Amino acid sequence: MKMINAEKIIAEETKPLGPIGAIGKGERVLGEGKEAVLFEHQGEGCLSHFWFGGNFKGVENTRIRYYVDGEATASIDMELYMGHGIGFNENHAPWATKHVGKIGRQNGIYNNYRIPFGKSVRVTAQRAAEADENPQIWWIIRGTENGRAALGGVELPKTARLKLVRLENYEAQPLEEFDLCNVSGQGALYQVMIAAQSTNLTFLEACMRAYLGTEKTPLMLSSGLEDYFLGTYYFDTGIFHADIAGLTHFNRKEAAFSAYRFHDDDPVFFHDGLRLTCRCGETEHGDTEGQKAYMNPEKTRFTTYAWVYQW
């Protein structure tokens, strides 16, 4: 029988908490397109704040990567704007929520994502190919040594790690159901961002679905795509930003939108895998077996970011 070392458990649970972080002030570290290290730390903890500034061509496509526990390939690899729920290079500002915000026209973008790590963390930036050769950038990164992440008022396991699953420029056919993520094990859905464009807005009739474990019948997360992001009637009141969800870009004439949705106060936990899907339009009653489309969806181009905690 394996003996439990109670003293060791108590020691681990009472490790002192302390702030960690770094800043950059007008630095020129992105020359020659190289990946620059903005922050790195050895030990256990949780990052909780990221802010970035820089007014230069292509800033919105700056690549931000988080390498957790010595990863060779970053488990979080995002374009700056898309990683903050903003599509189509939308520069509407200022706006701020408890999770994300954008205060400047082309800078002052931030998030408060909880990114736990067990051994180490390294945060990097890399300019886009179209960006100025060696632009000035500013940044702030902060967190807590020995800190943990929580979701829905529940402290997540020590082994929880935040992962980003991307689907980029996917052209979906009418009524096609496609995956935003398909992950195994235990975890929780944290955030979803979608940017999409079509020839009309009826793709917004799509219902979001979560297939938990081996279940063939999904948990329905919305009665329409704009409903999932808390909008209604094809976002009839336009752009908005709130803690739980926000519409960051909307062009009715070009049938284009981008939006974010957080699941911290509306958790979706899973114990044996999660498959999260969207459709290109919808059937009359949201029946995946049905063939009759509600309204007239056309093929639609989607980019999606799904953020998932796994342990």
Image (spheres, rainbow, N blue to C red):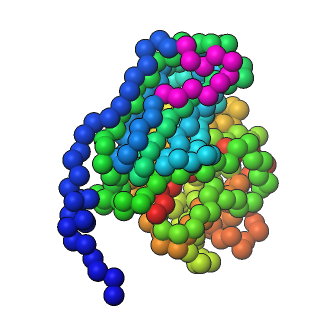
Residue 24 coordinates in the image, percent (x, y): 43, 19
Is 23 placed above or below 234 here? above
Residue 266 coordinates in the image, percent (x, y): 39, 58
Is 227 placed above or below 145 here? below
Is 204 placed above or below 238 here? below
Q: Within the image, what quadrant is residue 6 found in?
A: bottom left
Judged left or right of residue 158, residue 281 is right
Asked if the magenta segment contains residue 75, the reply would be no
- Residue 101 in sight from this viewpoint: no
Q: Residue at x 47, y 12 (%)?
A: 26
Say how many tags the image has. 0
Asked if the magenta segment contains residue 37, the reply would be yes
Q: Residue at x 55, y 13 (%)?
A: 28
Judged left or right of residue 238, residue 281 is right
- Residue 204 in sight from this viewpoint: yes
- Image: magenta residue range: 28-38
Judged left or right of residue 216, residue 19 is left
Residue 131 coordinates in the image, percent (x, y): 67, 18
Q: Residue at x 49, y 38 (%)?
A: 122
Q: Residue at x 75, y 66 (%)?
A: 292
